[in-house]
Image (tube, rainbow, N blue to C red):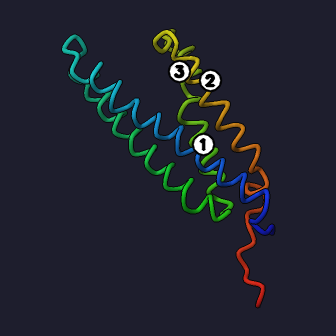
Amino acid sequence: MMDLSGSMKKKVVAAAWIFVVVAAVSGIQAVADAIPKHAFDMSWPDHARFHLTVGAANQLGFAVMTMLVALIPFRRGERWSWWALLGFALLSFMVLVPASVWHGSDPPPGAWLLIGACIAAMLLALLLTLEIGLRGADHRSAGR
């Protein structure tokens, strides 16, 4: 196991804040964009608006949990948290690419720039801290 100190500690702190910002963007999008634009759009069927509301609530909850994982266990170097953040990266913004292809519908113009920036930032954060995912941090005290 590795000791979480020095340059790795700085990388982990930077990576954690990248995930906090990206998760915040995801949560804000659910509340400030998806709900007002679609959940109250009476041209959508009731059941579609229901699923949009549930999806937005799930997205917001997923964002909050990601922020907590990034700020607490990941910053301590807990191995499982790196893998949880990889899951967030795959299931948050990266899922928009196959969804757009599958449904033949893209996000609003200009959104791909933000989506691409979020994906690139998360991949950079994961690559910088890959050692955490592979080995985790050594939390044993020197006296043991």
Q: Is residue 22 left or right of residue 77?
A: left
Q: Earlier in the sequence, mark 1 or mark 2?
A: 1
Mark 2 Cα within 10 Å, few/some/many (few <14, many 20+)?
some
User: Where is residue 15 shown, x and y percent of the image?
Assistant: 65, 47
Residue labelled with disc 1: 18
In the rendered structure, find residue 84 and report the number of the disc placed on it.
none
Q: Say which amino acid is labelled 2.
A: Gly
**Looking at numbered disc 1 in the image, what kind of residue is underneath it?**
Ile
Against 3, is 37 above or below?
Answer: above
Badge 2 marks a residue whose secondary structure is: helix
The residue indicated by pointer 2 is 116
Q: Secondary structure at mark 1?
A: helix
Residue drawn 51% across the image and 9% down it: 104
Disc 3 residue type (three-letter): Ala
Mark in front: 1 vs 2:
1
Viewer-closest of 89 and 33? 33
- Residue 99: mark: 3
